[in-house]
Structures are given as C-alpha cells and as structure tokens.
C-alpha cells in the first residue's frame, strides 16, 4: 500500500493535485516515492506525467508537470483545475532560486486564493542544501499572508519531511485532525564499542552535534552495567539510547517529544535486527522508516 493511500484512505473526496517546479527539482522522484514507497530512477518529464491512485473512498489525480522552460506554458490548465498546489524547490541549487521564485509567483497568480499550497524544499540529504528558514526569507513568503500554505524540507531519496507535509495536506483536504505520532529525526545503530554501523539521515552534519553524540555514545557504552545514561538533550534534539545484545541504538527526536514513545520505536527496531541479523540492519531501518514511521 502506497504512502499516500495510507494517508488519504478514509477521505471521500476526489482531489486534483498539481506538482510544479523547475526541471531537476525532484518532482517526479518525490511522486514515485509517494506511490511506490521508495525512490526510483527517472527521466525528465515531457509535458505532464499523470498518476492516479484509486481507493475505496478517494481518487487522487496527481499531475506532475514538466519543469523545463518549453513545458511551463502548459502549467496553467492543470493548476487552475487542481484543489492542491505543490511547488518543489531544489534546495541544493541556489543559483536557480530567482528563476524558481519567478515561476512560483506565476503559479500563485492563477491558483485560487482559498486552496492549500504545499512548498517542498527538496534534496535536504545534500551537504549544500539551503533549509526552509532561509528559503522563506529569500522567497519573501510573507506575500502568502492570508493563504493556506506550508513549507517543509524534504528528501526524495530518504523520504524525509514527507510525513509532516502530507499530514498537513490531509488535514486540509479531509477537514480531519490527525493524531500526531512521533517521527524520529534520525535513528542510528552502533556496535558494542560505540562504532556507528548505520544512520538514515543527516541531522548531525554540524560538527558540535556529532562530537556531542559520539561522546554520549561512549558514555553509554561505559555505563551499560548500571544503565545510568538513557537519554540526552542536545539543543533542540533529544537522544534516547538502548543496548540490546551486541548492538546499541540511538533515536533522535525533538526535545519536546516523549521518551517512552521513542524508546518503544527503538526497541522494535533493535529486536528485529537481533532476530534477523546485523547484516539486515540497513534494510530493516529503511523499511521501518518507509512503512511504519509514516503511517497514520
């Protein structure tokens, strides 16, 4: 079952969704992730790429519009007939921000003022990524005052940010509030010596956070007999630790989130790794992120 199907499965509405943005922003890769649950190889979209998801109570008409200059003239019709506008920005290509801003303004001029706008700043898995806070300032999103909009950092390769984005969108389309579940910022697996085995995101790109985490892991390794260290708060993040047999897990979440829920998720992952074997750790973690964390 696809990610979007799980999200919108209880709605009775038919929804037209236009996905627009410059070429190479990652629109088609994002769409494929939402439908297939994993990234797939793509080629540039020529014109319009239509995807339809049929469910018992809903039909989603996804229109992935080609971002090359020659195809932008075809955006108007699909945008005007859509109930949702998704604009994808390549957050790792600041040289094209002016061009992207210009095309976003054109799209906003023809999209109804009372319908939701979802802005995805894609490629947050890359080192040269410009995050959404700077995008909001650069694109002067105060011009959206009075409109219903949301912006999120995303990765079409890792699925990062898609849960938050489409939970927001679901609430707009269905009129129903979603009971929020904890969505880990990162999940890391270490061996008993504290050496990292796998991590599925780049929360700790900053050197100070990396040093702090590794120091905490070292302390945890040395205190496993009395379990004196089970969690650590570092700025806006909180890390919970668990030691199970030959591996150590660290789950990173926002500092305001509940330790108990974080520990429950981490325990499930560690139990499955121990059952299936360490060689399956990466696959297990990937499957968990795609198939469990993002479910409503």
Image (spheres, rainbow, N blue to C red):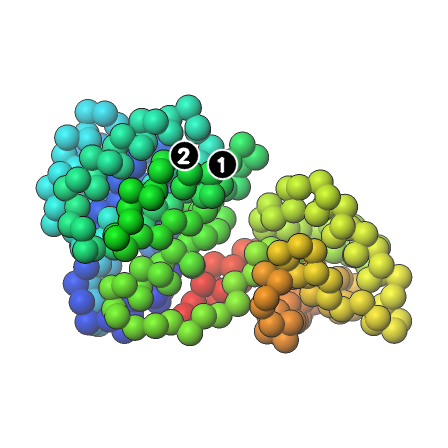
Q: Between residues 21 and 9, which one lies in front from this camera angle?
A: 21
Position of residue 20 in the picture relative to residue 241 (left or right) = left
Q: Residues within 10 Å of mark 1 (few under 14, many from 20)?
A: some
- Where residue 108 appears, as percent x and y from the top left, is 21, 42
The image quarter containing residue 87 is: top left
The residue that appears at 14% across and 42% down in the rendered structure is 110
Position of residue 77 relative to residue 16, above or below, is above
Q: Residue at x 45, y 70 (%)?
A: 180
Q: Residue at x 80, y 67 (%)?
A: 229
Whether residue 99 is situated above or below residue 36 in the rendered picture: above
Residue 20 appearing in the image? yes
Say which residue label 1 marks. Answer: 130
Q: How far from the left and from the top, in percent, is residue 19?
A: 26, 45
Helix, strand or loop status at disc 2: helix
Label 1 sits on a secondary structure element that is loop
Dot 1 and dot 2 residues touching (CB under 8 Å): yes
Residue indicated by mark 2: 138
Front of the two marks 1 and 2: 2
Q: In terms of sequence position, does the residue under pointer 1 or pointer 2 come before the other?
A: 1
Tell me residue 138's x, y (percent).
Answer: 41, 34
Quadrant for the N terminus, please.
bottom left
* 228 w.r.t. 28: above or below: below
Which label was assigned to residue 147?
none
Q: Is residue 46 left or right of residue 208?
A: left
Judging depth in this view, the residue of 110 and 219 nearest the camera is 110
Q: Quadrant of residue 286?
A: bottom right
Q: Residues within 10 Å of mark 2 (few under 14, many from 20)?
A: few
Look at the image and tell me whether residue 122 can be seen: no
Image vertical order of residue 154 relative to residue 165, above or below: above
Q: In the displayed structure, does residue 33 sit left or right of residue 112?
A: right
Residue 271: x %, y % from top left: 66, 71
């Amino acid at each position: 079952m696809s990610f979007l199907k799980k999200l919108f499965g209880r709605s009775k509405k038919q929804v037209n969704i236009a996905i627009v943005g410059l070429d190479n922003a990652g629109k088609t890769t994002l769409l494929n992730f939402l439908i297939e649950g994993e990234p797939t190889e793509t080629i540039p979209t020529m014109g319009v790429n239509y995807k339809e998801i049929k469910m018992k109570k809903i039909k989603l008409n996804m229109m992935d519009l080609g971002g090359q200059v020659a195809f932008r003239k075809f955006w108007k019709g699909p945008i005007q007939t859509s109930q949702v506008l998704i604009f994808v920005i390549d957050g790792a290509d600041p040289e094209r921000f002016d061009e992207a801003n210009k095309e976003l303004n054109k799209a906003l001029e023809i999209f109804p003022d009372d319908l939701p706008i979802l802005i995805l700043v894609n490629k947050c898995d890359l080192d040269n990524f410009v995050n959404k806070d700077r995008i909001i300032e650069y694109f002067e999103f105060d011009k959206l005052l009075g409109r219903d909009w949301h912006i999120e950092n995303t990765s079409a390769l890792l699925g990062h940010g898609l849960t938050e984005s489409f939970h927001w969108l679901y609430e707009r389309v269905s009129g129903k509030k979603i009971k929020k579940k904890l969505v880990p910022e990162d999940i890391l697996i270490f061996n008993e010596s504290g050496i990292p085995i796998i991590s599925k995101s780049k929360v700790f790109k900053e050197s100070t956070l990396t040093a702090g985490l590794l120091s905490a892991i070292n302390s945890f390794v040395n205190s496993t007999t009395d379990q004196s260290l089970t969690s650590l708060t570092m700025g806006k993040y909180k890390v919970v630790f668990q030691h199970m047999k030959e591996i150590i897990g660290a789950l990173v979440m926002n500092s305001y989130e509940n330790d108990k829920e974080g520990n429950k998720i981490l325990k499930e992952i560690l139990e499955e790794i121990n059952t299936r074997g360490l060689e399956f750790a990466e696959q297990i973690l990937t499957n968990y992120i795609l198939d469990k964390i993002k479910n409503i």
